Amino acid sequence: MIYKIGIELEIPLVKSNYLAADFIDIESLFLSLSKQGWKKKFDPNTCALIGVQRETTNGAEVLDSDFGICTFEVALAPVNSVEEAIQYWKSFKSSTLLPSMKTHELKMLGYGNQPVSSQLKHLISKKGHYSIYNNMISEDVREWFLQNFPGLSSVQFNFEISKEKVLKSLNTCFKLSTFIWAASANDPIANAKILPYKSQRFHGYSILAKDKMFDRLGLPPKPFTSLCEYIDRTWNVPIFEIIRDGCSLYPKNSLLTTNQFIREKKAEFVSLQGKVSVQEIQLEDLQSAIYFSWLDFRLKFNFLREVSFDELIVTVHSKNDQKLFNLVEYIILEVRPISMQSNEEEIDWLVLMYLILKNLEKITKYTSAWTYQDMQQTIVDAQYNGLNQYLSEKTLGKIGLDLLGLIPVEDLEKYEQHLFRLHSRFKENRSPSDDVIKMFNEQGVDAMLNYLTIYQ
């Protein structure tokens, strides 16, 4: 059962000449929106203007930037159905985003990175907690991360599903990782040059997911046996940050885990200004540790207000999901691998992921044809071979066709307008990245940029 659906979109923002938008562009955009009923958002650490938001009957709409100021992030309020989500995004885009972009002579791209601009280190957003990444990223990949990550863009779907289905949904999605990453890849060109892999974002996650980011970013080393285990594993990786009075603090001991913090009850933390203080662990630290995990598919737990610090710890360490359910109001599964798409294909992927979760039992049974290890061993190769990559004696394109074949006929007919392009792609073993590369080679960079531009 799917109760609510929310969409978050990270969109490359460029000037009229297709170079990455800068701080002046974004600040001007936010200031303009603040005069149209949107409320300004300021970072508590840097006091910088980082976005705007407004309340709706369904919740907040938020416009801000992601890791890079040139990555425009749109977070829409949750709605009750996939049909509502589709219409909401289309309407919001045409009524709010496109007119604002035209006014400020900016363009949004349906793409997974900045296709022309490179060396993006100077465009990292002025959000204080982003500086903490310097403590988490391995030295050998830090410069690549700082120069490239600010441009990476994805579309993320948030599904509130029944608690009892969350674990199976999570593990089934991970079993489909090779397919989803390859089929939705849409970022094969950066600095106006073809990359050796289909997705720059996948490459970035792959090289970053080690050391202090291991089991926190990208693909986990193994599936989950319980939701309690999922939480406990977020408590067993080094703490990213804790929040005190709205401001970010990071542990002086960069290897400090939440479980260690639980045992020791207090630890030294450092403010972004370099001030060291001793902090006692709080309930909010347990919850934020769960949130500061960026697996390809991650869970967001909305705990009941009356949950106590000791109760949450005992429940998680008991590995009893039934007890955990009693502490949770609802759980959201966030789908994260999909690159921002062109020609509204992000809607096609929203529909497909919705139908996969709706038909979970059949899809889970289908994915039993391969192991988690099979998926891990093929996911990197698929970034070179695309949908021609084999998994369990089938190409990924054939797996996509099989998934569509498991969807009831009435749903295929109902959502045909959102599935026919995916069907063609799977049949032809052709991802969005393949289209972009072909256009770049045959028609040049200008035609490619025009194709990627969101006009409606």
Image: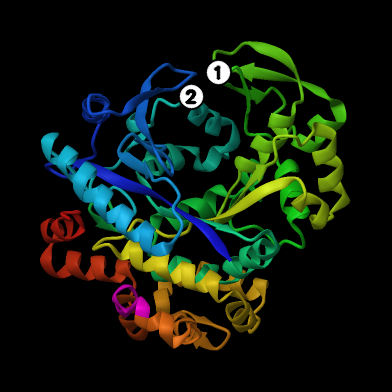
Q: Residue 9 at what x, y percent from top left?
A: 37, 49
Q: Is there any visible trace of residue 429 in the rendered image?
A: no
Query: Height in image: 239 above or below 151?
Result: above
- Residue 95 vs residue 98, the one in the foreground: 95
Secondary structure, mark 1, is loop
Q: Which residues are magenta?
A: 414-420
* Label 2–label 1 contact, CB within 8 A: yes
Q: Residue 94 at what x, y percent from top left?
A: 20, 50
Q: Residue furthest front?
A: 57
Q: Is there any visible trace of residue 278 in the rendered image?
A: yes
Q: Residue 350 at what x, y percent from top left?
A: 41, 64
Residue 68 lies within the magenta run: no
Residue 416 lies within the magenta run: yes
The residue drawn where x is 58% and y is 50% is 209
Q: Which label sits on residue 294?
A: none
- What secondary structure predominates along the stretch shown in magenta? helix
Secondary structure, mark 2, is helix
Horizontal arrangement in the rendering, residue 312 relative to residue 22 (left or right): right
Calculate the distance from the C-alpha at mark 2 to the C-alpha at mark 1.
7 Å
Q: Which label sits on residue 272?
A: 1
Packing grade of label 1 (10 A; few <14, some 14-19, many >=20) is: some
Circle 2 residue: 128
The residue drawn where x is 54% and y is 72% is 358
Quarter of the figure with the N terminus: bottom right
Amino acid type of the residue tagged 2 in the rendering: Gly
- Residue 242 vs residue 267, the one in the foreground: 242
Amino acid type of the residue tagged 1 in the rendering: Leu
